[in-house]
Image (cartoon, grey):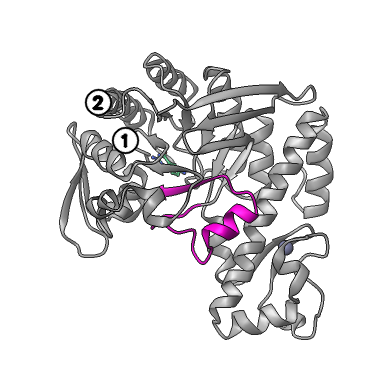
Amino acid sequence: MAAITYEHIKTCKQTGARLGKVHTPHGSFDTPSFMPVGTLATVKTMSPEELQEMQANIILSNTYHLWLRPGEDIVKEAGGLHQFMNWDGAILTDSGGFQVFSLSDLRDIVEEGVHFRNHISGAKLFLSPEKAMQIQNDLGADIMMAFDECPPYPASYEYMKKSVERTSRWAERCLEAHQRKNDQGLFGIIQGGEYEDLRKLSAQDLTSMDFPGYAIGGLSVGEPKDVMNRVLEFTTPLLPADKPRYLMGVGSPDSLVDGAIRGVDMFDCVLPTRIARNGTCMTSQGRLVVRNAKFARDFSPLDPECDCYTCRNYTRAYIRHLVKNNETFGMRLTTYHNLYFLLELMGQVREAIQQDRLGDFREAFFEQYGFNQP
Ligand SMILES: Nc1ccc2nc(N)nc(O)c2c1
Ligand SMILES: [Zn+2]
């Protein structure tokens, strides 16, 4: 199978943003790119056809969750994730480390890996770099992630240093355990928190292992936006210019624009799909909570400037009625719109990079969307 390759097209003259393409065995996608999250082998309430219609060319799924349910053995028997979920675009699987740290109360990190409890049954489990690679190879995603520790925020310098050194040793073990040596398809994850020298140490360790792409982990874990932006400013330049850079767990419209400006190529976040299910929508005028009584007789679209299926065919009054009555179709309409909104936003970001005006775009977008100007 082909490797994962990055094609740099141009860098915006006004900012550090870059326009590119990532090529995978299941097609290519333009960057900067937002990747919808499909944790349990489905982007909740969306069909593959709807995802293709809105040009989501890569989606995420998750090692930890699929290991627990239905079990990677069943997915493997189905012929892998693409077959199992009838998705022929690209798939990226996170390695499970983050989910263990965020979901499981009891956990004990040792050199070998992490002891923790199954967050559903409470049973004791153990995840190691080798186990995470075996699960991901069985799932068969195009892009897999190394098994890392995502330390809590804030973390002391001493804790962070030990964690970075162990994550580098784990990355080495992941490369070792990766069965699909020829197609690479395994990204390293840079840790180090907000400590510039530890980010440098992590980047040096991982780039020396020559992964086909690199993720910036340990962010979007509760730190203020200016801390995230500062860490990106000194971390993205440490990564090879000819490989994709993936900021994990991000995010909101403003963070996507600010991450692109700082040289990030790939983003993922559950935010758009999660808030959609309780009726919160991202629109060109800012967030809209469609449950709100003021929309009871509002027969305009969620977003007058959006041309998605939801906005072309349904009104705020109708969607409010569905969401208030927990009608599944309501969640489908808000999810479709939120994903379309972010994918459209990334299209506008790519166009602004092409025209060397992403700084101006940020200005206008933040003004219109209502983000406080820094
Ligand atoms: N904010 C996030 C989200 C997902 C992550 N996944 C891994 N494996 N590592 C991290 O640091 C993450 C951070
Ligand atoms: Zn819409």
- Mark 2 neighbour class, 10 Å CA radius: few under 14, some 14 to 19, many 20 or more: some
- Mark 1 neighbour class, 10 Å CA radius: few under 14, some 14 to 19, many 20 or more: many
Question: Where the N terminus falls, by quadrant?
Answer: top left
Write down the quadrant of residue 53 in the picture.
bottom right
- Callouts 2 and 1 close, C-beta under 8 Å: yes
Q: Amino acid at mark 2?
A: Arg
Is 303 or 15 nearer to us in this picture? Answer: 303
Does label 1 point to a residue whose CB lies under 8 Å from ligand 1? yes
Write down the quadrant of residue 312 in the picture.
bottom right
Q: Position of residue 362 (x, y in %)?
A: 78, 40
Q: For the view shown, which residue lies furthest in the left direction?
A: 124
Is 107 or 66 nearer to us in this picture? Answer: 66
Q: Is residue 51 magenta?
A: yes
In the rendered view, does 78 fall on the left or right side of 315?
Answer: left
Location of mark 2 (residue): 173
In the rendered view, does 125 fall on the left or right side of 66?
Answer: left
Location of mark 1 (residue): 147
In this rendering, does residue 374 appear at all? no
Secondary structure beneath label 1: loop
Identify the residue at horizontal 61%, vertical 34% (top origin): 229
Secondary structure beneath label 2: helix
Question: Where the C terminus falls, by quadrant?
Answer: top right
In the image, residue 361 sits, relative to residue 312, either above or below, namely: above
Q: Position of residue 282 (x, y in %)?
A: 69, 60
Q: Is residue 122 magenta?
A: no
Q: Position of residue 8 (x, y in %)?
A: 64, 22
Magenta residues, start to end:
37-61
| Ligand 2 occupies quarter | bottom right
Q: Position of residue 101 (x, y in %)?
A: 32, 47
Q: Mainly helix, strand or loop, the magenta region?
A: loop
